[in-house]
Amino acid sequence: MYENIIGQNKVITLLQNDIERGSLSNSMIFHGPAYSGKLTAALETVRVLNCSGDRSVDCQCSSCQKVRSMNFEGMLFMSRRQFACYIDSFISSFESSGRMEDFDNLSRYIRLMFMSFSDNIAAGAISDSDMNSIHKLQEKAYDILEGNYDAYRSFKSLGADTRQKLSDNLHELVSICEEISDTFKKPSIPVDMIRNALEWSYINQPNINRVIIIDMADYLDDSSRNVLLKRLEEPSPSLFFILIAENKNRIIQTILSRCRCYFFGHNTKEETAQILSKTFGESKQYESVEQYLLRNDETSYNNMLPTLIKVINYVFNFHHTFGELEAFLQKNNDKKYAKALVKNLSILINRELLTRETDINIVGNGDILRNVSTDDLTTLNKLLSETYTKMDIYNLTPVWALEGIFYPIKSMVNAGKIKC
């Protein structure tokens, strides 16, 4: 078991010992830096808990096959993770290698992404119009993956034109991931989704160890945490919770006290090289898995964070002039980049608002935001959301759209109507 995890020897040994001794906690927290293997370990835990064979990574029992294909009835997965970078990397790897292993990983992650919007979780928690859009996107994604499966199996032996057409189809999956991310910007999972998952947890499923995986659990809001806490206080023998978090200190103490914590540390350069070689067939050296996954995405949150900090300071710092703000905005006349700026600034503000709810500081959020009132941040966030939608509906010029957001805010800061 856990043979598919590279590095993390200490935490894997702990998990193996707990499972073999029958002492695995029903409530667990997998915490540590991004892309350190927490999600992979969580999915492997689901497989091991339900394996009817020898628990080895290549076991072919029916339960193991279902878990690998993301078609296991005993698992719920909730996440607001950005899946586009994974999908793009698996596509690139498949295009260069033609390995069906890359294609299968691509399919697994697509199914994992849509698992967050299954009826068991999303019913009543997401508007009908959004659910209809998600169902259409899901249908389109599965058609891409399944409609040309035989052709993908022979990918490397096909003619150049046919390969290009198939590649173009696969790259539509990246756009689908991005569209879902655009619709659901907040990193927190709505409380109604948590409630739905907990209702599912009471359903009797004989001979199955059910597992609920909550990704980015350190971003749950107060209402979600309180609802979850009540269920953790009523453990069931065949029900397991795995909370995935980057920073366990953002999780309230009452939840922490009911969970067994497993820490995943940073991978070494050697371990990173092994992971990238095995998972993506990548031979180049990267400092981290995160650096590799985000290498081509200049509009990702992490890559845009320095720009976000700049715009925050230009807008909210009284010492910066309108002229400086204008010069900065004039450089952002690319629509895709401008939309990404608006979207990621909304994410940053949501992180700051969640920080206030949990009373735990999130490093790197731009300290100046902490001096802006919650009401003012909420107003700005609403303006960001409205502008983001209008940029497509009315085909707004990117610079004008950004000016429409930041000039009024800057004016109020200068007039003392917004205290910073």
Image (cartoon, grey):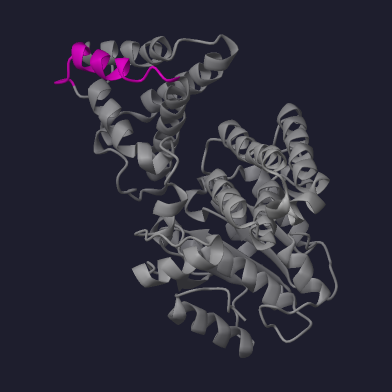
The image quadrant where one finds the C terminus is top left
Q: Position of residue 404 (x, y in %)?
A: 39, 10
Residue 102 in magenta stretch: no
The image quadrant where one finds the N terminus is bottom right
| Residue found farthest to the bottom | 21
Q: Nearer the viewer, residue 255 or 240?
A: 240
| Residue found farthest to the left | 319
Q: Position of residue 54 (x, y in %)?
A: 73, 87
418 sits to left or right of 354: left
Residue at 70% of width from left, 56% of height from top?
198
Q: Nearer the viewer, residue 276 or 41?
A: 276
Q: Nearer the viewer, residue 340 or 378?
A: 340
Residue at 37% of width from left, 66% of height from top?
266
Residue 328 in magenta stretch: yes
Q: Position of residue 312 (x, y in %)?
A: 29, 28
Q: Position of residue 56 (x, y in %)?
A: 67, 83
Q: Say if residue 92 shows up in the picture.
A: yes
The answer to which image quadrant residue 33 occupies is bottom left
- The number of numbered discs placed on residues in the rendered structure image is 0
In this picture, is 208 found above or below 108?
below
The stretch of residues the image draws in magenta is: 318-334
Q: Say if residue 237 shows up in the picture.
A: no
Residue at 41% of width from left, 28% of height from top?
341
Residue at 70% of width from left, 78% of height from top?
58
